Amino acid sequence: MRIVLVGPPGAGKGTQATRLAEKLRIPHISTGDLFRANISRQTELGKLAKSYMDAGDLVPDEVTIAMAKDRMAQPDAENGFLLDGFPRNVSQAEALDELLKSEGIKLDAVLDLEAPEDEVVKRIAGRRVCRKDSAHVFHVTYSPPKQEGVCDVCGGELYQRDDDSEETVRTRLEVYHTQTEPIIDYYRAQGLVVTISAMGPVDEVTGRALEALKSGQ
């Protein structure tokens, strides 16, 4: 199955992408992982991407698309893949269509995770991370530490990352609405969009997604 996963920041895309890819036995291909892998292996595309990132510029679409093309050509993606974070805009979606067409394959579905904006802000802005170990993550509402500001696991100080502030989250949401949301209409015109609620327990959302993909509704 070939799937594109979309949704606003804070909708749980990363969590659901990992779980769905495992259940469907297809590779989870995320933009972040593509960049990290190419940069760490010092591929030509990685060096090119890093040069833009070091200069504080956005990596051009053609570089991202070339990385995605290379990854989708790997043997483990022969029977499908789940794309997370790509395509990020309509021009990337059009390029992906051309790429898949040239390979004689097509997308099966575009899974759209929906979450109310206020809930997204609450989810992200309430996150607190341990300074000693960033793997220790708490939430002021959903999973608060026993002692405010102190990590339950190692006693480290809990803090709010700069990119988790409400102001930053709302800016990220604005970027999502402006750049990424239009791809939902683009794919809806092709009859590919399957929309589900991203609200509720993680297991429930995963089950909802699998059922929706299965029924195509």
Image (cartoon, helix red, strand yellow):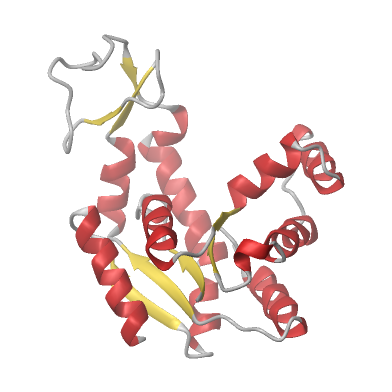
Q: Is residue 56 visible?
A: no
Residue 81, position as x, y percentages in the image:
55, 67
Give the vertical position of 194 relative to 61 (above or below): below
Q: Looking at the image, which residue is at 68% across and 45% down?
A: 35
Q: In the figure, is residue 53 to the left or right of 127?
A: right
- Which residue in the rendered view is the most extreme toward the right? 44
Nearer the observer, 28 or 46: 28
Q: Nearer the viewer, residue 25 or 123?
A: 25
Q: Is residue 178 left or right of residue 60?
A: left
Residue 177 visible? The answer is yes
Residue furthest to the top in view is: 155
**Quadrant in which the C terminus appears:** bottom left
Estimate the x, y position of residue 143 in percent, counting from the top left. Answer: 18, 33
Is residue 118 depicted above or below 184 in this figure? Answer: above
**Where, by quadrant of the figure, is residue 131 drawn?**
top left
In the rendered image, which quarter is residue 104 located in? bottom right
Q: Residue at point 41% right, 24% down?
A: 134
Percent position of residue 183, x then y: 55, 74
- The residue sitting at 36% across, 38% down in the picture is 166
Whether residue 79 is situated above or below residue 132 in the rendered picture: below
Relative image position of residue 165 (x, y in whole percent) = 39, 34
Q: Nearer the viewer, residue 165 or 139?
A: 139
Instruction: Answer with left or right where residue 28 lies relative to residue 44.
Output: left
